[in-house]
Image (cartoon, rainbow, N blue to C red):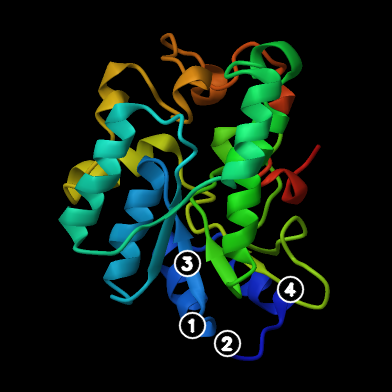
């Protein structure tokens, strides 16, 4: 990692295209990784591998993903000939949670506890080993919560003690249409569920297809208020 001036790099990268942001991120940090789950993230992988072949890639295996998603992860691994680290929940904590509350408690008391165990804690363990990470966040994914996030930021959720974690959001200013234009143009693999009306894909019990003209996040945690549709991975770095 080279010397890093957050305000300076925020100014330099404001409004820049994804490739420029990725190049800046990887030039400044050796110990950096891409978080992979959806279509946006594979576009990031495709872009990043043209800049640096040894970029780390990880994905959260919550144990509740669609079968199509597991096959998709394997497809991406083979297509790009890369290692994808799968992050699993703590077994003892998960076992205790499921014994106490069952497999579908989130329908009754919200998704935050389940996501905390299956997503946030495994991610926290991984991010503790990194200096920076790269996400596929876009502003248009949630106008309620993501409208003011910058291209690069201090990750206030996962920074710990005197160790600061930097987060890059290269696709921040791209629309969903731009992501799919890239996927089509460069023949990037994508989850087959996208062809069945699923736009934003998470765990199987908490994701459903959306109707025409619905916002893409409408299919995630649909039983909850729209302003609460964050799983905790980015919640500390966005607007409440």
- Regarding mark 3 in the picture, which secondary structure is present there? strand
Res 1 label: 2
Between marks 2 and 1, how big is the CA–CA gap?
6 Å
Label 4 Cα neighbours within 10 Å, binned few <14 / some 14-19 / many ≥20 = some
Point out the tag, 3 or 4, that comes first from the N-terminus: 3
- Regarding mark 1 in the picture, which secondary structure is present there? loop
Between marks 4 and 2, how big is the CA–CA gap?
12 Å
Label 4, on which residue? 164
Q: Are marks 2 and 1 in contact (CB under 8 Å)?
A: yes
Q: Is residue 164 above or below residue 93?
A: below
Quarter of the N terminus within the rendering: bottom right
x 46%, y 35%: residue: 63
Between marks 2 and 3, how big is the CA–CA gap?
13 Å
Q: Are marks 1 and 4 in contact (CB under 8 Å)?
A: no
Quarter of the C terminus within the rendering: top right
Q: Is residue 13 left or right of residue 160?
A: left
Res 33 label: 3
x 45%, y 15%: residue: 208
Res 30 label: 1
Which quadrant of the structure image shows residue 108?
A: top right
Between marks 3 and 1, how big is the CA–CA gap?
9 Å
């Amino acid at each position: 990692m080279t010397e890093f001036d957050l305000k300076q790099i925020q100014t330099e990268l404001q409004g820049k295209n994804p490739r420029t942001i990725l190049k800046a991120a990887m030039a400044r940090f050796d110990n950096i990784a891409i978080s992979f789950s959806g279509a946006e993230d594979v576009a990031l992988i495709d872009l990043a591998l043209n800049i640096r072949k040894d970029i780390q890639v990880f994905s959260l295996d919550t144990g509740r993903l669609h079968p199509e998603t597991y096959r998709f992860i394997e497809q991406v691994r083979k297509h790009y000939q890369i290692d994808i680290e799968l992050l699993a929940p703590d077994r003892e904590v998960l076992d205790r949670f499921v014994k106490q509350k069952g497999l579908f408690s989130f329908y009754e008391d919200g998704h935050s506890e389940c996501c905390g165990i299956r997503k946030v804690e495994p991610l926290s363990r991984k991010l503790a080993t990194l200096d920076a990470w790269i996400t596929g966040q876009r502003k248009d994914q949630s106008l309620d919560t993501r409208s003011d996030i910058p291209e690069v930021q201090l990750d206030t959720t996962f920074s710990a003690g005197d160790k600061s974690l930097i987060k890059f959001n290269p696709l921040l200013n791209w629309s969903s249409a731009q992501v799919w234009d890239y996927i089509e143009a460069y023949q990037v693999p994508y989850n087959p569920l996208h062809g069945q009306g699923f736009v934003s894909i998470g765990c199987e019990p908490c994701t459903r297809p959306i109707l025409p003209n619905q916002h893409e996040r409408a299919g995630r945690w649909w039983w909850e208020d729209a302003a609460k549709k964050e799983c905790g991975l980015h919640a500390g770095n966005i607007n409440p």
